[in-house]
């Protein structure tokens, strides 16, 4: 593990593996760099992969108050560590964060995004509700509310509360506010070539959000991966990402 200081002084933890062009992984809710390790193993055969903990997760710091701009600065700090320019793979809400960074001017020549969730004012309302629950020290209720919002049945969440992994979810409950804040504004537009992927067996709303992103971006294409869900299967996702990042094919 290594660390880099973001612009506001927050320590961002990361690992580097592989050889080739630099590639940064940006994961989503409940995830830290452990989520990216299986994907890193495959992509590291072709790229130098920077796999980091977003602020508030894993071994990274969490300087308050939170703002999406601070997370963009975190990614910029990672890009600087990668040599000043890097391909970026974003997952779930991390996909939207990566897109916002590219639109903000971060030096990202190409984006590959997997299963971006829908954006809009509803996410802002959810962020406020989750912030209230966390402030009341009802972290478990915040996790449950978030899971309900993403379509997990309440009966399943009730079972999750008795699982060994539940305390880990409660520990990062405050970062769910971050995820919803990232999703609370309209999609930005960037000319960066972008691949938007969704899983064939994912909920309809994720197919719709993938297409909405492609519709708004001038140089984007969509790939629906057969048999896939919201969970990343590295053996399926990695070859598609590698093909896109190494291709010179122009898009719309």
Image (tube, helix red, strand yellow):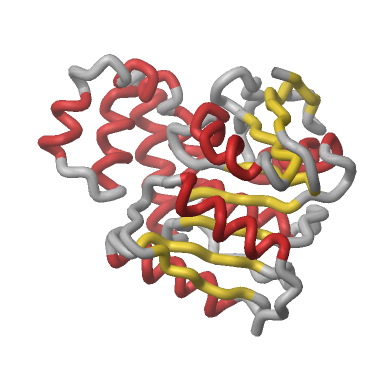
Residue 120 visible in the snapshot: no
**How far from the left and from the top, in percent, is residue 180?**
46, 46
The answer to which of 217 and 89 lies nearer the viewer is 89
Decide: is 205 above or below 172: below
Q: Residue at x 45, y 25 (%)?
A: 172
The answer to which of 224 and 94 lies nearer the viewer is 224
Q: Residue at x 78, y 30 (%)?
A: 6
**How far from the left and from the top, in percent, is residue 157?**
19, 33
Left or right: 130 in relation to 78: left
Q: Residue furthest right?
A: 83
Residue 203 visible in the snapshot: yes
Q: Residue at x 79, y 53 (%)?
A: 106
**How far from the left and from the top, in percent, is residue 224?**
42, 68
Left or right: 153 in relation to 37: left
Decide: is 177 above or below 113: above
Q: Quadrant of the N terminus?
A: top right
* Residue 152 found in image quarter: top left
* Residue 217 found in image quarter: bottom right
Q: Residue at x 77, y 56 (%)?
A: 108
Q: Quadrant of the C terminus?
A: bottom right
Left or right: 248 in relation to 177: right
């Amino acid at each position: 593990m290594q660390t880099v200081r973001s612009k506001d002084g927050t320590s961002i933890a990361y690992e580097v593996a592989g050889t080739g062009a630099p590639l940064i992984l940006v994961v989503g809710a409940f995830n830290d760099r452990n989520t990216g390790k299986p994907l890193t193993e495959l992509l590291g055969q072709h790229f130098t992969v920077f796999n980091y903990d977003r602020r508030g997760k894993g071994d990274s710091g969490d300087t308050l108050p939170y703002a999406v701009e601070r997370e963009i600065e975190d990614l910029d700090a990672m890009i600087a560590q990668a040599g000043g320019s890097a391909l970026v793979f974003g997952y779930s809400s991390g996909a939207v964060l990566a897109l916002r960074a590219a639109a903000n001017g971060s030096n990202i020549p190409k984006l590959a995004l997997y299963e971006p969730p829908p954006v809009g004012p509803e996410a802002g309302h959810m962020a406020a509700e989750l912030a209230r629950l966390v402030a009341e020290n009802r972290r478990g209720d915040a996790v449950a509310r978030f899971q309900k919002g993403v379509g997990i049945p309440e009966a399943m969440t009730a079972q999750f509360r008795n699982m060994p992994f539940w305390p880990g979810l409660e520990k990062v409950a405050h970062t769910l506010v971050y995820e919803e804040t990232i999703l609370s504004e309209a999609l930005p537009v960037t000319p960066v070539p972008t691949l938007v992927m969704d899983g064939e067996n994912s909920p309809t709303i994720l197919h719709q959000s993938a297409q909405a992103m492609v519709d708004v971006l001038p140089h984007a294409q969509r790939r629906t991966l057969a048999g896939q869900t919201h969970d990343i299967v590295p053996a399926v996702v990695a070859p598609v990402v590698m093909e896109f990042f190494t291709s010179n094919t122009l898009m719309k």
